[in-house]
Image (cartoon, rainbow, N blue to C red):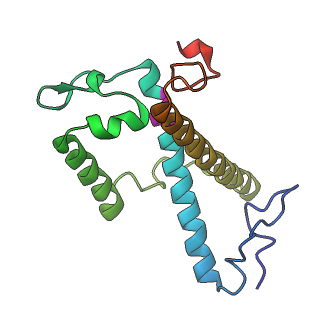
Amino acid sequence: MGYENELGVIEPTGFFDPLGLSANIDEETFAQYRTAELKHGRVAQLCVIGYVVPEIYRFPGEIAPGVAFADIPNGVAAINAIPSLGWLQMIFFIGAVDYWGVLGDFDIGKPKLDPDELEKRQVQELQHGRLAMIATLELLRHDSQNLVTPGFDGLDTLITGLPFLY
């Protein structure tokens, strides 16, 4: 069964499945793959925002008693700086959102669109998610390289190429 006419198949790439993961699957499995792609794309979009925002703004308050948000470094360096209570809060919140579907009712406030406009916006969401997944990987790669070799690119800021941020 071919999926060459599915939503998200766009020129000039066309249907891109170099590993053949969709070669012998049914429509239900393909729908699960598409749902996972959308979910990962949305998370990646949040990740990119999460990388950019701390460069220009810090929330007031503390992530744990005695540890202010402003004391936590940006990017990969934050992994070792976040206290256990901070990790516990994040894991609980992410688990609650995933398990109970909090923040997941997308029918609220959804505009009534004609089918052509809805399809156009769904394709845009897939494209934005795909781009965000690539951007997330590059931000992690760049940040990790700077962590291993400080100043490897001659710059000491996480997000290079956006001079208006600094």
Name the magenta segment's main secondary structure: helix
Q: Nearer the viewer, residue 134 or 140?
A: 140
Q: At which x and y percent is residue 147?
A: 45, 33
Residue closest to the far right = 12
Tell me where residue 10 sits by quadrant: bottom right
Image location of residue 153, percent across then percent down:
61, 24
**Residue at 18% across, 44% down:** 84
Q: Is 63 placed left or right of 12 in the picture?
A: left
Residue sitting at x 51%, y 19%: 156
Depth order, front residue of 43/147: 147
Magenta stretch: residue 49 in it? yes
Observer-nearest of 149 and 55: 149
Query: In the rendered view of the protein, which quadrant contains the N terminus?
Result: bottom right
Q: Which span is picked out in magenta?
A: 48-52
**71 in relation to 86, above or below:** above
Residue that appears at 11% across and 30% down: 65
> Does the segment drawn in magenta span residue 159?
no
- How far across and how far down the image is residue 53, in percent? 46, 27
Q: Which residue is drawn at 38% across and 51% down?
A: 103
Please count the marks in the image: 0
Residue sitting at the far left: 65
The residue lying toward the viewer, choosing from 114 and 152, is 152
Residue 23 percent coordinates (x, y): 72, 82
Q: Is residue 108 left or right of residue 67?
A: right
Residue situated furthest front in the rendering: 149
